[in-house]
Image: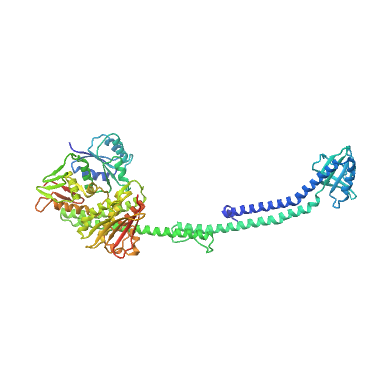
Amino acid sequence: MSTRVLVIEDDPETAGEIVAELSSHGFHVDWAATGSTGMERAGSGDYDVMTVDRLLPEIDGLTIVETIRAGGIKTPVLVLSALAEVDDRVRGLKAGGDDYLTKPFALVELSARVDALLRRPADPRETVLRVGPLTLDLIERKAQRGGRLLDILPREFQLLEYLMRHSGQVVTRAMLFEEVWHYRFDPRTNLVDVHMGRLRRKVDAAGETPMVHSMRGTGFQLRAP
Amino acid sequence: MRLSFIGTTTFRWTITISAAFVSAALFLVAVIYQRTIGSNEARIDDNLIQEVRTVTAEDAENALVRVQARLMEDPRRVRFAALFGPDRQLIAGNMNSYPSDFIANGKVHDIVAERIDSQGIEVQTAHAVGALLGNGNTYIIARNFDDFAPLKESITETVTLGLFPATILALVCGVLLSMRTQSRIEDIHQMAQRIMAGHLHERLPSRGTRDDFDKLVDIMNAMLNQIEHLMSEVKGVGDDIAHDLRTPLTRVRAALERGRDSAQTLEDLRHAVDKGIIGIDQALGVTTALLRIAAIEHGQRNAGFGEVDLGSIIAAIVELYEPAAEDKNLRLVSTGMSHILLRGDRDLLFEAISNLVDNAIKFTPAGGTVSIELVRTEHNVLLRVVDTGPGIPAPEREAVFRRFYRSDKSRHAAGMGLGLALVAAISKLHGFRVHVADRDQGCAIEMICSPA
């Protein structure tokens, strides 16, 4: 059975693009155009993930999230907002949202975040992560590719850990910045790329099949060769 | 004649002051009256009562002598004295008959008496006191006050001749002053209407007399100057926004048009679309930054506030920018305190400081140094981002924190118009102050942060 996604969005054109993007990832996507239909469907608990627009006719997006959370529904929620308020994100997450994305956003950013929400958290008892020939020892703080020990800095270790936990998925610069640096802002420059470039040169030595891939536009992906 | 001046404050004040003046004058007249006529009358009344008491205490037969003695000296013809028998028949004296309704009880009564003497009979009013004597006779003496009439008349004349013209004069002054005030307000009103209609360069009229109105007009005109200045600034920002949006959008349009007309392969088309997306992202970046600045400037203060360690924010920024600095062959160092706790929004402070570092790296030539200094002064915490770049000329040091301000040197560096404006907005939100320090070489931007 395919993954089911609920999109609650009042603007038909935006909704059309979101539905098309997520469908192209093989998801089964349902669209609710108003707060009340959105609330009804979200309350069914039939979905694996949903995106909720912050401002909706009839019922506000945050009210929907609060209501379904109060009803015990744990479906991961990505809140989308066109508001520029400084504390809007804080409110979105307080209401029960799992992630927050400000409009206008790149579609790849949206699908990467939906993917991340769908990925079940790794077993916390796991002490060694493996992707293909790459191993990361979380206790010893050591990274190896095949038999080659990688000489990486602490921040690069954190980057690699996040990429390995999300291997095969696209992770965007903004996601890396939030998850690895734990700061929330939109780096206008290519700072994350510089750090990723260094990590990539260490992971993919000359002659080896590349594992760290730049995705056109906004993101990166770690794949087993 | 228009009566609208009646409502003016000046007119009301004049009326109030006139009324106070009239009251004071009337009070003065009353006091004078009391001190002259009033006290004389009271003294005479007392004498009458005393006299009657003396006569009652004496032998009743003596009363006749008393009546005659009293009438002996009365050149002004104001005295009465009479002795009436038990049947109220006149025994002696100058009262033609027993006064009607008179009670002889030793107290003062107003009477109307018929005076009879060598000049005939005359009806007079008088204050009278009488007493019943031991032998059944009634002894009455009285005093007429007509000799006070000239004094009374002169006081009344003083009131009418002095007070009324003075009151009229005050009213006339009030009306004239009020109309003058009215006309100045009307002048100001007309000019204000013109200004409201859009003639922002106009100023309220001043008469050069340095009076209260002129002072008020000066204050209002200073306010108008500031408003006009702000309006022109807003207009300038509007033009800048339009420019900053049109430039990338023009490129987008050109790239997409060229792609549609001349792309030979799918790859060509993708290349054109990518250029389009880059341009649109730039335009969106401008609007996002503007909205963020506005949101930070007008936002709720405390939503994201908590205790933050400025030192650890700086450490993270150094770590984040280190590779970029190294790629440009720059040294990026942090000095001073490594931990300072403040109340603030962690993400916004990170953004502000990283903007300063970002600029410093952008403008410092290869081989230079960018340092972030964190020091505690006596009252404050001082954060300083110093670089060995070209610096900011003194006249531009305040302007760089304005939206879209571009110094000629940075005109061609991308995305420079809003970074420092954002830093200024974030500083203000935290109650910090940010300014460009005075340096001959390089550039130092200081943020003065109040400790938690």
Q: Which one is in front, B67 or A57?
A: B67
Evaluate whether residue B199 shows in this view: no
Instruction: Name the residue: 87% across, 37% down.
Output: B134
- Does residue B75 appear left or right of residue B158 in this picture? right
The image quadrant of residue B331 is bottom left
Evaluate whether residue B385 shows in this view: yes
Q: Is residue B65 above or below residue B155?
A: above
Q: Position of residue B241 (x, y in %)?
A: 32, 57
Q: Position of residue B308 (x, y in %)?
A: 30, 48
The image quadrant of residue A34 is top left
Q: Which one is in front, B150 or A1?
A: B150
The image quadrant of residue A68 is top left
Q: Is residue A3 above or below residue B411?
A: above
Q: Which one is in front, A123 or B224?
A: A123
- Does residue B68 appear left or right of residue A2 in this picture? right
Quarter of the picture holding the N terminus of chain B: bottom right
Q: Position of residue B231 (x, y in %)?
A: 40, 58
The residue furthest bottom is: B440
Count of numbered circles on the image: 0
Q: How is the image coloured?
A: rainbow
Q: Position of residue B240 (x, y in %)?
A: 32, 58
